[in-house]
Amino acid sequence: MAVIELRPCTFCGGEAEMEMDEAGLHLVRCQECAMATPPEYRPDQAVADWNAMWDGALKPCPFCGEDAIAAYDSRGLPCVMCRRCACRTAPCIGEPSPEANLKAARAAWNRRACDA
């Protein structure tokens, strides 16, 4: 079996672990803050969703100047949010894959963020 590399949580830096929900779907969840990916049928897709939160540079928050993170909201929808003031993009759901939706959320954030 291949070793699965999970990056630390983009929100708190905590350790992430693969889990299976009650429906038998796979997700990755931070063991510190409970940030999680949306459930997926394939475990490799859940890992890709989790690790995709790290991909791509984000501009600082246009309101407070704090760093932003790509993450999933409480409904499991991809968005970008400020670490300090909780400013966030609307969830991006129009793309064919979770990675593409996170990429769209990053692009939306960077279009509206100031260059601090």
Image (cartoon, grey):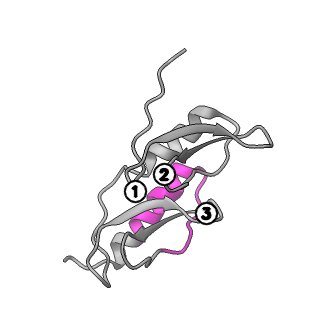
10 Å crowding of disc 2: few (<14), some (14-19), many (20+): few
Estimate the x, y position of residue 82 in percent, counting from the top left.
38, 72
Estimate the x, y position of residue 22 in percent, counting from the top left.
79, 43
Secondary structure of the residue carrying tag 2 is loop
Position of residue 28 relative to residue 63, above or below, is: above
Estimate the x, y position of residue 53 in percent, counting from the top left.
43, 52
Position of residue 108 relative to residue 85, above or below, is: above
Instruction: Residue under label 1, please give it.
Output: 12
Is 49 left or right of 58, judged from the image as shown?
right
Residue located at (33% from left, 54% from top): 56
Residue kind at label 2, given as amino acid type:
Glu
Residue kind at label 1, given as amino acid type:
Cys
Instruction: Residue under label 2, please give it.
Output: 32
Q: Earlier in the sequence, mark 2 or mark 3?
A: 2
* Residue 38: mark in rendering: none
Estimate the x, y position of residue 37 in percent, counting from the top left.
58, 50
Q: Is residue 100 magenta?
A: yes
10 Å crowding of disc 1: few (<14), some (14-19), many (20+): few
Residue 112 sits in which quadrant?
bottom left
| Direction right: furthest residue | 23
Looking at the image, which is closer to me, 62 or 23?
A: 23
Is 68 left or right of 88, judged from the image as shown?
left
The quarter of the picture where the C terminus appears is bottom left
| Direction bottom: furthest residue | 63
Q: Is residue 116 magenta?
A: no
Q: Nearer the viewer, mark 1 or mark 2?
A: 2
Residue kind at label 3, given as amino acid type:
Ile
Secondary structure of the residue carrying tag 1 is loop
* Residue 93: mark in rendering: 3
Q: Which range is magenta?
A: 89-108
